[in-house]
Image (tube, rainbow, N blue to C red):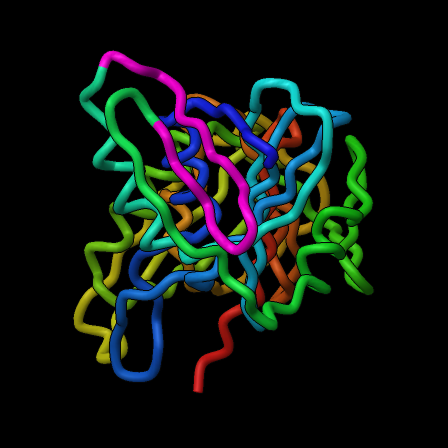
Amino acid sequence: MLIININLNELIEGIGAATLKGKYGNTGGSKRSSIDNTLTFIVSKDIPSVLISCSSDTMASMVRVSITPVNESKIFKCDAEVLVKYLKTFKGQDVENVDICIGEGFLHLVCGLKRAKIAQRISETNLDIVEKLMSCNISDTNASFSKVTFNTKLTLNANILSTAIKNAGIVGSAIYKLDYNDEERTITQTHTCVISSKDSTNSQEYDERLLLTNAEGESATVEFTAPLEKFCKKDSEMFIWFNDDSPILITDILGTRRLIIAPYVRG
């Protein structure tokens, strides 16, 4: 039986970042949802870590969390909501880490004086998009995903992006527009982009200009729907790669997080 030892708070936060549970836009309003409720865990013995991934037809995420070194690699799946409910009961003890014992068809969770047992999930979750996300080509100046090569790269603090998404979320549509104008940078000598949102009746609108650490590439605009504030790791630097009306690739500076989002198409 493989046992992985992992920080409880980092695991809970990593699951939240991978599932992106929150408000998503749809015709006529918004609804609470997530990328998917099935989590895939990829345990690595070479880099002592677990890769938490989640995918749907339009999005995929991966979040890497460090673990105590193990002597074998393994892949397992489980229900995200069930797992998180039990993990949250473990909080409040004088214990930082939780043991996840991977048995035949079950996961045994042990933390301090508390224990839980949950079923592993056998699902037909398509890992193709996750595998593409793991293997996508990213360098300091270039990035590509599948057949898409990104021409614009924005660098900014995760706190700034998170706050802007939360503020624009007050509108309630959960549909956001990301706009970068390279000509404005030439005029003002500062790097900025705009996050905005409006409702379906045009009775409410919000926009916020974000100060960027850096920007490279062409002017571009894209709409998307996702609670990105859940993906942002506090105080870290984030990279956003995109084109006009293209998928959006978001990564952190350490390479421990990747997220691909399809553009939102109205109507």
Q: Position of residue 89 (x, y in %)?
A: 21, 36
Please state if 206 lies on the left or on the right of 179 as rendered.
left
Which residue reaches farthest bottom?
267
In this picture, is 110 found above or below 221?
A: above
Q: Magenta stretch? A: 94-110
Please state if 3 lies on the left or on the right of 33 as rendered.
right
Q: Position of residue 80 (x, y in %)?
A: 40, 53
The prevailing secondary structure element of the residues shown in magenta is strand
Q: Position of residue 117 (x, y in %)?
A: 36, 46
Number of labelled discs?
0
- Residue 13 in view (yes/no): yes
The residue under the point 64% across, 65% down is 246
Please state if 218 lies on the left or on the right of 240 as rendered.
right
Q: Position of residue 243 (x, y in %)?
A: 67, 58
Question: In this orientation, which residue lies closer to the viewer: 173 or 191?
Answer: 173
Question: In this orientation, which residue lies closer to the viewer: 55 or 161?
Answer: 55
Quarter residue 229 falls in: top left
Question: In this orientation, which residue lies closer to the viewer: 213 or 98?
Answer: 98
The residue under the point 25% across, 37% down is 88
Quarter residue 153 falls in: top right
The residue under the point 47% across, 34% down is 100
Which residue reaches farthest top?
94
The residue under the point 60% across, 55% down is 260
- Quadrant for the N terminus in the image: top right
**245 within the magenta span:** no
- Residue 155 in view (yes/no): no
- Quadrant for the C terminus in the image: bottom left
